[in-house]
Amino acid sequence: MLEVINQSNDPYFNLALEEYAVKNLPDSENYFILWQNRPAVIIGRNQNTLEEINHDYIKEMEITVARRMSGGGAVYHDYGNLNFTFVVAENNDFANFAKFTRPVINALGRLGIAAENNGRNDITIAGKKFSGNAQFKHKNRLMHHGTILFASNFEEMVEALNPSAEKISSKGIKSVRSRVTNISEHLVQPISIEEFKQILTEEVFREEKNNASYQLGEQDLQAVNELRDKKYATWDWIYGNSPAYNVRNKAAFPWGSLDIRLEVKRGTISGCRIFGDYFASRDIAELENALTGIKHREDDISKCLDHIDLGTFLPQAEKQDFIELICR
């Protein structure tokens, strides 16, 4: 395992580094990265940015808005939050979150804190979330990354994020603050985030062999910065064009949420976009394209899906639930 040394606090650079690592670093090695961002909201790959943020507050506080490669929901980063990334060979580990969260749980165990995997992609302490995780697959490589709330500013988090009513109601909670916690709140003896980084790195390396550091070279940095400037820092990637639609249906499921937007002309779907908090194992644009040109009625959509393996896009979705959501 090679630890990629990265001291950047620039969200655009750090997200570009993840993509560069999974697509360009030699696949003969596995990689581990610890990184922190300045205050930022990071949007999931399949989400509508404007619906996930408190735009006025973010503008006032000069909080960065960025979009990552992986699915899942929006998260808030600041200097009290630590992020970890694994880039490894893909060995049927897509959606196997426990494999990658184990070092975090073990690190907390050394500090006398009992943590556990909870739900789809969270790690919790006493039932409260302190870590959310997501994945991205590229060819034979898998990137797993997660957040760790160590001493984050929850007041700013609550103000910056604008979570959907469906997500809140589906989990039976009244606020973001009621379901999250910082590691620092549970420490018997205070430690710094730098000390925790060292403990976590030791736990990651304990499970690996031939561990070493990887310093980004000039060629690496040039490529990452080019990807940063041409993709991650652009309006097109972060916000894009609002989709044309005149039908919008939303629903929350145990495995995530979907926000389906359709433009229907003369009874036929002429435009389709699928947003939400979910993990897709294939490019969701392929499913959107397949639905475009289909009549907006249950029988036609069902016949369309008969020729598509919905599970390859949304592994845990039920076909009938998906059809009813589109046609509701």
Image (cartoon, helix red, strand yellow):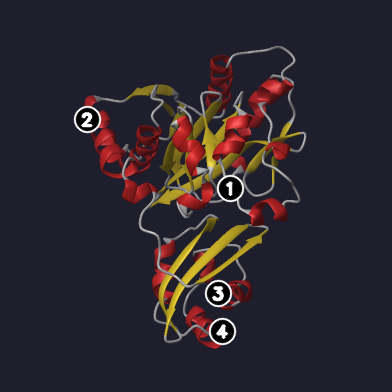
- Which quarter of the rendering shows the N terminus? top left
Q: Which residue is under mark 3?
A: 326
Q: Determine the CA span between mark 2 and mark 3.
A: 47 Å
Q: Nearer the viewer, mark 1 or mark 2?
A: 2
Going from N to C along the chain, the mark reached first, 1 or 2, is 1
Going from N to C along the chain, the mark reached first, 2 or 3, is 2
Compared to residue 317, the image places residue 157 above or below, namely: above
Q: Which residue is under mark 2?
A: 219
What element does badge 4 sit on?
Answer: helix
Is 165 on the left or on the right of 71, as rendered?
A: right
In this view of the protein, can residue 275 be seen by the observer?
A: yes
Is 221 on the left or on the right of 168, as rendered?
A: left
Q: Determine the CA span between mark 1 and mark 3.
A: 29 Å
Q: Quadrant of residue 18?
A: top left
Circle number at residue 298: 4
Q: Residue 265 location in percent, x, y?
A: 41, 82
What element does badge 3 sit on?
Answer: helix
Q: Residue at x 33, y 47 (%)?
A: 235
